[in-house]
Each structure stands twice: as C-alpha cells, then as structure tokens.
Image (spheres, helix red, strand yellow):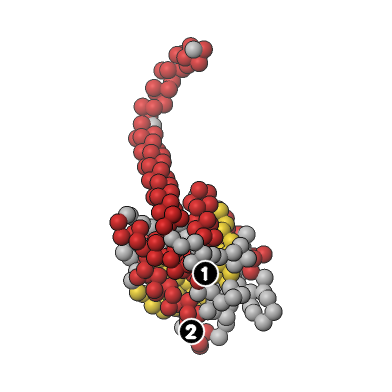
Amino acid sequence: MWLMVVSVPLLPAIVMVFNRYRVKITTLCHRALAWALRLARGRACVRSTHAFVFSKCTHGNADSVLETFDLYADTHPSLSIGPQRGEVLDGVLRRVQPRRVLELGTHCGYSSVRLLRLLPPAGRLLTVELDPLTAELGEEVILVAGFKHSQFQVLTSSSAEAIQTLRPFLEPERGTSAGLDLVLMDHDPQLYLPDLLALETEGLLNPAGCSVLLVDRTQRDKAFREILEHLRERQDRYCIKTQLHFMTEIFYQKEGTESLGK
Ligand SMILES: C[S@@+](CC[C@H](N)C(=O)[O-])C[C@H]1O[C@@H](n2cnc3c(N)ncnc32)[C@H](O)[C@@H]1O
C-alpha cells in the first residue's frame, strides 16, 4: 500500500521515460520474453528426453542409451546430433583416436555418450553445458550409459568461461603432447569462431594436430559461411577437411604445415 502511495508522484516521470524509450523498452521486453520462452521450452525438451531415455534404456549399456535416444527422436523434436551425424562423428573418432576431447554443448548427453564409447582407455572427455539443469540431466545420462567420472567431466558454464579454465585439465602425460586432439562444437554457431580462436590463443589445441568438428544446424547460414571464409584465410594452420551431413571437419596443425590434412 505504502509503495503505491510513494509511486503516485513518480507516475508522470515514469510515463515520460516510457514514452521516450518506448521502442527500446518494447524490444527489450520482447527479447526477454522470447528468451524465457526458449529456456522453458528447452528445459521441457530436456526433461522429457531424459525421462524417456532413463526409463527405457538398458542401464550400463551405451549402445542401448543411443538407440533409446534415436527412438525418442522418431516421435519427438530432438536436439541430439542423431544417428546420421553420429556416424560421421564415429568415423572421425576411429581415424583420429583422440585422447583428449572437448565438447561444447552437452545437452542430454547423446553426443557425449557417442564420443566416450569410442575413446581409447586413456581417453578423457570434457563437456561444457551452459544451463545447470541440462548439465545435471546430461551428466546423469552419461553415468547411466556406464561411464565413470574418471573418463569425463561436465563443466557447467558458458563455453567462453570454460575455455579460460581448461589448461589444468590438459597437462601433457608421458609420451603425449599437451592439448586437445578433438573438439566437437554443437552449442551456438555464433560462438564457433570466437571459441575456436580462443582455444588457439590459449594454446589448448594440440599443436601436432587437432580435429575440430562443427555441427551445422542452420543449413550453412551467414555466420557459418563467415567461419569457413576466415579459416580459408588461415591456410597455414587450418584446413577444411570434410563437409558431410551438416558436419564440417576442420584440421588444425601448428607444426609441420606440409603434412596438413592428416
Ligand atoms: C544442440 S544442443 C547440443 C546437443 C548435443 N551435442 C547432442 O548431440 O546431444 C546445444 C546445447 O548447447 C548449450 N549451449 C548453448 N550455448 C552455449 C554456450 N555458450 N556454452 C555452453 N553451452 C551452450 C545449450 O544449452 C544446449 O544444451
């Protein structure tokens, strides 16, 4: 009640400010509403995917977890990379045999399970998810698939923040060089290029060679074309290796540029 009494004399000023910045305030409100709706819809999708996979898969069996995800995607909208892109990913994993893998965009854990099931025994996955609830449910799915915390870690933060904290996870082991051997980007196409450049600047990509897989869900929109144009100008370090089923593989190498394109 007292709040109403206090705000009455301020009403003319509030109306004046609103009139002056009406367009900006309306745009801001629309954006906030759209963001809240996207978040609510995204979380509903995550909860429903997680509940389906958790209740229908054989626990401890990674293949069963993936099959259950695919079954869910047959009848529901899904953000998982799915079996077609999954097979491209499997092919890259078999060829590269990476020890240190970074995934940006964990979501419900489909691609994390796909990555983990083909890693060598000493391999390790770091997977980054912005939304805390999604990260929690994604982590649970990875554990349900039978993987252990010694094999993976879910980092709950934005990709940009995570990249700044990765160094301690990537110290060289005996007989290996420091850095990531494989990066899967499936978070936000607008961030693919800045995040890739940040990984390079921080010296987190294995200088002897790192495959970077970009998932293109936007059917090669402007942002995606700009990434490829930028990389084409950096042919001393990057080469575009393959583009299959809206997955683009980029190969990074700092040393021995002659052998670019492992
Ligand atoms: C398309 S889904 C990833 C699907 C997942 N790779 C799979 O196949 O199961 C994208 C995920 O990236 C997360 N994300 C979006 N922007 C991000 C950012 N800047 N940093 C980390 N995660 C982000 C979203 O919350 C969402 O869960």
According to the picture, the residue beneath numbered tag 1 turns out to be: 116
- Placement of 131 over or under 20, stated as above or below: below
Give amino acid for label 1: Leu
Q: How many marks?
A: 2
- Placement of 75 over or under 97, stated as above or below: above
According to the picture, the residue beneath numbered tag 2 turns out to be: 262
Residue 239: give x, y in percent of width and height: 44, 78
| Residue 228 seen in the figure | no
Q: How many neighbours does mark 1 have within 10 angstroms: few (below 14), some (14-19), or many (20 or more)?
A: many
Asked which quadrant contains residue 57, the reply is bottom left
Residue 64: give x, y in percent of width and height: 43, 66
- Placement of 10 over or under 179, stated as above or below: above
**Element under disc 2:** loop
Asked which quadrant contains residue 169, the reply is bottom right
Residue depicted at 67% across the width and 64% down the height? 168
The reply, left or right, for residue 30 in relation to residue 96 is: left
Q: Nearer the viewer, residue 93 or 58?
A: 58
Residue depicted at 61% across the width and 62% down the height? 149
Q: Nearer the viewer, residue 83 or 184?
A: 83
The reply, left or right, for residue 136 in relation to residue 33 is: right
Residue 28: give x, y in percent of width and height: 40, 38
**Element under disc 1:** helix
Estimate the spatial distance between the alpha carbons at disc 2 and disc 1, rounded to whole Å: 22 Å
The reply, left or right, for residue 105 in relation to residue 75 is: right
**Sequence order check, earlier mark of 2 and 1:** 1
Residue depicted at 36% across the width and 68% down the height? 83
Give amino acid for label 2: Lys
Q: Which mark is residue 162?
A: none
| Residue 13 seen in the figure | yes
